Image (cartoon, rainbow, N blue to C red):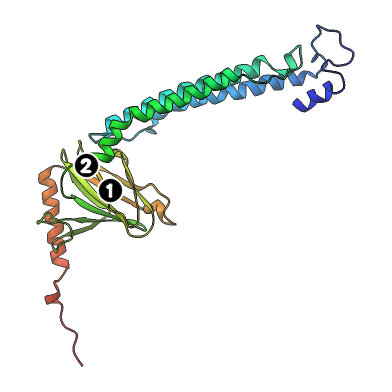
């Protein structure tokens, strides 16, 4: 389209040959040109319309935030919605303006060729300062939530150690002495159990590569970094079984690096621990019970 316009204007100082001032310079364009302008404008209008429709319809099809079952989830979701509305309004405004400009200033419908402008220094300053101020506001506004989730760790010994590994979650509970790294530690794979309404402190490690410990319903997502012990904490508010997934592409089996987290009452949790302990004792023999290999 632009290319055609340029050809028409070439050598004629902007006004096409054979036209008197006041006539639309585009009168000579074939009819299809005008229709293509309308079609393109409407196509661009579909972006904000379908974009908004997606967000309105998605919750009805359960394609939305998973149910929040954590104490700090509310403030995280609040931040999410706040930023969504903020960016949503800007998105709608810019897309609608884009559509309107395409519609109104369609070359084929215009009586004048486009003119070149230098740009506006004031506008540049304004649209730099507004996003910068918004970013600064968000950075300050979210500080308390960040501190709750990542900095104000409950004062307690780790409730469990989670070791990410290609492609599973290895869990170690402290056992009866409530201390990790002792003989009575209990080992489980991909099956995290958590007592409800209690602070729960995870010590997160990785055995091989970068993974990301993601508990969508508990609004927890934390990278597991080889060589680091990273504390992660939450307080679950509703019993049930939820997903553990890896949110960092960690190799060919990344997609199947799934586990589950069961939130249950303290009594059920203790029963489960006792069962794991009994199973472990039944299947593991102490060194003194292992028969010596026959000596030569
Ligand atoms: Cu992984």
Residue at the (71%, 22%) spot, across then down: 36
Q: Count residues near mark 2 (Cα–Cα under 10 Å), then give few for <14, some for 14-19, many for 20+.
A: some
Q: Nearer the viewer, residue 140 or 169?
A: 140
The image quarter in which residue 58 lies: top left
Q: Which mark is residue 125?
A: none
Q: Position of residue 294 (x, y in %)?
A: 18, 88
Image quadrant containing the N terminus: top right
Q: Position of residue 268 (x, y in %)?
A: 12, 46
Whether residue 283 sits left or right of residue 78 in the image: it is left
Q: How many marks?
A: 2
Q: Earlier in the sequence, mark 1 or mark 2?
A: 2
Q: Position of residue 128 (x, y in %)?
A: 52, 24
Judging by the rendered image, the residue that carries numbered circle 2 is 153
The image quarter in which residue 240 lies: top left
**As drawn, 76 above or below 269:** above
Secondary structure beneath dot 2 equals loop
Residue 71 seen anywhere in this rendered image of the structure: yes
Whether residue 283 sits left or right of residue 150 in the image: it is left
Q: Count residues near mark 1 (Cα–Cα under 10 Å), then give few for <14, some for 14-19, many for 20+.
A: some
Secondary structure beneath dot 1 equals strand
Q: CA distance from mark 1 to mark 2?
A: 23 Å
Q: Nearer the viewer, residue 229 or 262?
A: 229
Judging by the rendered image, the residue that carries numbered circle 1 is 260
Q: Position of residue 159 (x, y in %)?
A: 18, 49
- Residue lying at the far bottom of the rendered structure: 296
Residue behind label 1 places its C-beta within 8 angstroms of ligand 1: no
């Amino acid at each position: 389209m632009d290319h055609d316009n340029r050809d028409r204007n070439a050598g004629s100082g902007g006004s096409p040959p054979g036209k008197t001032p006041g006539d639309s310079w585009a009168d000579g364009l074939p009819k299809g040109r005008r229709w293509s302008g309308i079609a393109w404008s409407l196509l661009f209008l579909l972006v904000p319309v379908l974009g908004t429709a997606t967000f309105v319809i998605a919750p009805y099809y359960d394609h939305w935030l998973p149910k929040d079952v954590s104490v700090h989830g509310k403030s995280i979701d609040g931040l999410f919605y706040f930023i969504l509305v903020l960016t949503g309004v800007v998105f709608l405004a810019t897309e609608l303006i884009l559509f309107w400009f395409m519609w109104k200033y369609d070359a084929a419908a215009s009586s004048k060729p486009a003119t070149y402008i230098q740009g506006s220094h004031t506008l540049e300053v304004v649209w730099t300062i507004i996003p910068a101020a918004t970013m600064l506001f968000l950075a300050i506004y979210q500080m308390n939530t960040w501190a709750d989730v990542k900095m104000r760790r409950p004062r307690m010994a780790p409730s469990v150690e989670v070791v990410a590994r290609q492609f599973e979650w290895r869990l170690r509970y402290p056992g009866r002495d409530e201390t990790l790294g002792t003989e009575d530690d209990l080992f489980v794979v991909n099956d995290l159990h958590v007592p409800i309404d209690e602070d729960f402190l995870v010590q997160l490690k990785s055995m091989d590569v970068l993974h990301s410990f993601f508990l969508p319903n508990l609004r927890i997502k934390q990278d597991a970094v080889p060589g680091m012990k990273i504390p992660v904490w939450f307080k679950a508010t509703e019993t049930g079984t939820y997903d553990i997934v890896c949110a960092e592409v960690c190799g060919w089996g990344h997609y199947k690096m799934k586990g589950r987290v069961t939130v249950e009452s303290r009594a059920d949790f203790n029963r489960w621990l006792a069962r794991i302990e009994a199973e472990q004792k039944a299947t593991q023999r102490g060194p003194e019970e292992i028969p010596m290999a026959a000596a030569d």
